[in-house]
Amino acid sequence: MEEKKDNRKTEQLEQHKNQQKDKFITTNQGVRVNDTQNSLTAGERGPTLMEDFMFREKMTHFDHERIPERVVHARGAGAHGYFQVYEPMKAVTKADFLQDPDAKIPVFVRFSTVVGFRGSTDLARDVRGFAVKFYTDEGNYDLVGNNIPVFFIQDAMKFPDLIHAVKPEADNEIPQASTAHDTFWDFISLMPESIHMIMWAMSDRAIPRSYRMMEGFGVHTFRFVNDAGKSTLVKFHWKPLLGVHGVLWDEAQKISGENPDFHRQDLWEAIENGNYPEFELGVQMVAEEDMDRFDFDLLDPTKIIPEELVPVVRIGKMVLNRNPDNFFAETEQIAFHPGNIVPGIDFTNDPLLQGRLFSYLDTQLIRLGGPNFHEIPINRPISSALNNQRDGFMRQEINKGKNHYHPNSIEGGCPFQAKMREGGFTTYTEKIEGRKVRTRSKSFSDFFSQATLFYNSQTPIEKKHMIDAFSFELGKVKRERIRERMVGLLTQVDHELSEKVAARLGMDSPPEPEKPINKGVPADAGAEEFEPVYVEQKIKSSEALSMLKNPVSFIVSRRIAFLCADGVDGNAIRNARENLESQGANVQVIAPHSGMLKTDSGEKIKIDSSFIATSSVLFDAVYIPAGKQSTDELKKNMEAIHFINESYKHCKAIAIEGSAKEVWEKTFPGSMMPDLPQGNDALKKGIFLDSKIEDFIEGVSKHRFWEREVAEMEK
C-alpha cells in the first residue's frame, strides 16, 4: 500500500513539473519578472527607489491580503464532492436536484468550530458547523447547519448576546476556543431555553473523532413544496456512513497540544488516500396539517422531533472526493447563506431562522468586500446569473448593453420574469394573521423536557462523560453565584446529574433553582408569565440520541501505532501490517529514534515517527510485536510506557505479541495490572495477547472498549 502511495505521488510530481516548465513569475499585469529577490536600489548599498514597481506591487498585495475572519465558525476545513438522490422526491418537492437518481450534483462542504478564532484548535469542546452548498441547475442551494440538531436560543434577537457571552471575555480576551468561563455560564444560567443545547454540548458530540464521523442537522424546520403547491414540513439530517464517534476530553486536550489541525488533517488525508467521506441525507417529514399534533412547537429551534415519532428517511448520498486547490480562495471565501434556496424548498416562521436570513447576507458584505461576493468562483452558481444588478466593489461580470432595469422595452423586455412552470421561484402562500408584538409564543416555554429526554437516552458511560464535562466547565467559573444558579437549573433536568455535579463542585446538595427561572423577559411583563411549563414526554428515551447505542464498526482509515525498537520480530511486523493495510488501516511504525528500524533478521524498515514526536492520542489502536531486543529496549523507554498506559486509559484496542508481554507488565506493575483476557473476553476488553490478527482487526473496528471505564466506575 505504501509503495502504491509513493508511486502515485511521484507520478503527480512529474505531471506537475511538466505542466509548470514553461511558466514564469510575472507581475499582476503579466510582465515576466527576472529578479524577485532584490529591491531596486541606487547602487549596491544605496537606498531603495520608489520607482521599483515590482516591489510596490508585491508589498502592497501582501499588506492587503488578509480579510476579516468569520465572527463565528472562523476555523474550518472544506471539501468538494457530489450528491445523488436515491429516488425522485416529486411527491413532496419540486426541487430539481432531488429528482434524478443518475444526476451527480456538485457540492462544497465546510466543517468548522464555532467559538474559536482561525488560529485555535480543532479539538475544542464546541458545536461544529456542517454547511453544504449544492450547485444545482436551478441555482445554488445552501443547507447551513451544525452537528447538533438544536440551538442555544429561540429568537435571533439574542444571537449577539450569546456570541458576546461565549467568546473570550472582553477585558483580557481569555479564554480562547472555550466555554469554560464566567460570562458564558452567566448567560446560560439566566436563559433556561439553552438547557437542551447545553446537554448536547456537554456530551461527547461536542468533541468528535473526525469531521467524517459526525452527524449534521439543518436545525430548523423547513418546507418542501411540490408542483401542486402543497407544503410538507421537513427536518434535514446528515448521517455519516462511518457512524458517529467521539474522543475523550482528556484526549481532546492533549490532541490540541500535539496537533491542533487534527480534524483538518484527517479530512485532507482521507480524501487524498481515496477514503472518501460519505454521508446520507435524511429527512423527517410532517404534513402541514399535522404541525400542531406534537407536545412541542416545530418552530422552536431548541427542540427535536424524536425519531420514534417521525423516522428519518434517507433520500440520497453525498460523497466528498476532492480537496480544495487553494484554502483561501475556496474554503475561506465560500459564502453560505440559509436564504439561498431553490424552487421546492421554503422557510417556516422559526424566529431564529428568520433572523439568520438577514445576518448571513449582512456579514458577507464586510467580510468579502461588498455585494459582489457571489461572483467569487467558489460562490458562483453553475446556472447563469442574469439580473439588473450592476457595479459595486469587486464587480467581475462585464455587462453589455444599455438596459439594467425592469420592466423595459429597449431589450424587448429581456431578461424576463419566469413563470412557475418555467422554474420561477414562488414563495409558499401561508396565511398570516396577528398584531405586531414583541413576545414569545407560550408553546416555546417548555425548556426542560427534551433536555431530560436527551440525558435519559444516554448510556452510563455517556452520562459519566457529561457529568465530567459539567464539572470541568463549571469548575472554571470563578463566581460561586453563577455555579449555584446553573446547578439549580440542572435539578430541573435530572436529580442524579445535578447531585453529582454539585458534589464535584463542593456543594452540600443541589440548590433549588433561582426564581424566577427565566430572566429573559420583557421589562414590562411579569416574570411569572414567562416561567417554564413542564410537558410530560411521550418518549422517555430515544436510542437515536446515544452515540454508543448506534455503533458502526469499521477499520478503513483507522490509525494503528506499531511500537517497536531495533531487534523487533520482522515477520510479526510484516504479517500484521499486511493484514491491517489490506483492510484499509493506516499503520505507522513508532520507535525510540527516527530513521530506519533494524529487525531481528537485519532487515531495515522505515520509522514513521519517534516517540518524542508523536503521541498515543493521535492513534486509534496499538500493536506491540515480539522480539526480545525490541521489548528490552521498550521496557526502559518511558515514552513507550506512557504511550501504552494512555492508550489503555482511553479504552483503545491493544495487541501484545510474545515477549512484548514484558513491556505490558512494566507498564502496569503489581496490583495495578489489568487482567489479561483470553479468547472471547479479549473482544470485550480490547486487550489481545497472542491473539489471531483477525481478532485484533475486529477489535480495532469496534472503536473503543468502554468496559474499562465501567470497571473503574464500579470500583
Image (cartoon, helix red, strand yellow):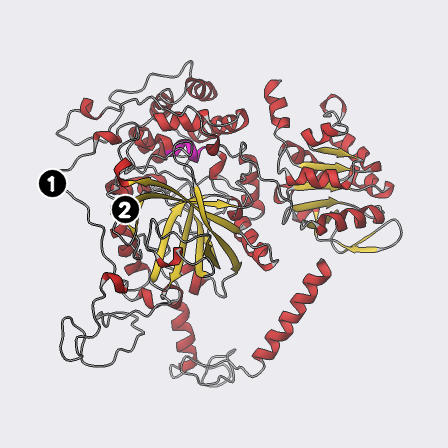
Disc 1 residue crowd, few under 14, some 14–19, many 20+, Cα 10 Å:
few
Q: Position of residue 458 (x, y in %)?
A: 49, 28
Identify the residue shown where x is 40% and y is 82%.
29
Q: Main secondary structure of the magenta part?
A: helix
Name the mark on residue 436: 1
In the rendered image, the residue lying farthest to the right is 601
Taking the image as shown, residue 364 lies to the left or right of residue 130, namely: left
Identify the residue shown where x is 25% and y is 81%.
400
Identify the residue shown where x is 74% and y is 24%.
675
Residue 708 higher or lower than 113, as above or below: above
Residue matched to label 2: 231
Q: Earlier in the sequence, mark 1 or mark 2?
A: 2
Quarter occupied by the C terminus: top right
Q: Which residues are magenta?
A: 197-202
Disc 2 residue crowd, few under 14, some 14–19, many 20+, Cα 10 Å:
many
Q: Position of residue 569 (x, y in %)?
A: 84, 46
- Do the CB atoms of the residues marked 1 and 2 lie less than 8 Å apart? no
Identify the residue shown where x is 42% and y is 59%.
332
Q: What amino acid is labelled 1 in the image?
A: Lys
Taking the image as shown, residue 699 lies to the left or right of residue 177, namely: right
Q: What amino acid is labelled 2 in the image?
A: Ser
Circle 2 — which element? strand
